[in-house]
Image: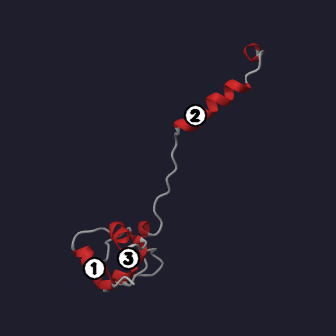
Amino acid sequence: MVSKQQVLHLVDLGHGYSEIGRLLGIPAGQAYLVATGIPADGGDTVTGRQRQRPGMLPSHSQRLVNPREMNPSYSERVHEWIRTRAMRDRGPDSGSR
């Protein structure tokens, strides 16, 4: 079980929560929760006093539990498949239409 002291020690050493999670084998949002007692998903209202807790991020803790999705707009592999498929689908009279 990961302890608050372990996580805060790594924060003090300058590690980010994503790296801390990898080092300790837990999700980054869980590392944040262990360190601060505040869920990273932003579901709780955080008081001014809670913002002073060690390990608190000034903002954007939500990205620890909901990282950006990767949605590539281009894939050479897909484009090659489309080109190959289009060439196979061409009929003998495809140029006359």
Task: Please name the amino acid that badge 1 sits on.
Answer: Leu
Tags 3 and 1 touching, CB below 8 Å? no
Secondary structure found at label 1: helix
Q: Quadrant of residue 6?
A: bottom left
Q: Residue at x 22, y 75 (%)?
A: 12
Image height of 81 relative to 68, above or below: above
Q: Give the residue number, with chain letter if any, for mark 1.
A: 8
Residue 17: where, in percent of width, then height? 34, 70
Sequence-first tag of 1 and 2 = 1
Left or right of 45, for residue 14: left
Classify 10 Å Cα crowding around label 1: few (below 14), some (14-19), many (20 and above). many
Q: Give the residue number, with chain letter if any, for mark 3.
A: 31
Left or right of 91, for residue 6: left
Task: Please name the amino acid that badge 3 sits on.
Answer: Ala
Left or right of 14, for residue 90: right
Residue 14: where, in percent of width, then height? 23, 69
Secondary structure found at label 3: helix
Residue 36's tag is none
Separation (CA) of disc 3 from disc 2: 40 Å
Sequence-first tag of 3 and 1 = 1
Nearer the observer, 64 or 46: 64
Tally of numbered discs: 3
Sequence-first tag of 3 and 2 = 3
Q: Residue furthest top?
A: 96
Separation (CA) of disc 3 from disc 1: 9 Å
Quadrant containing the C terminus is top right
Q: Give the residue number, with chain letter if any, for mark 2.
A: 79
Left or right of 85, for residue 96: right
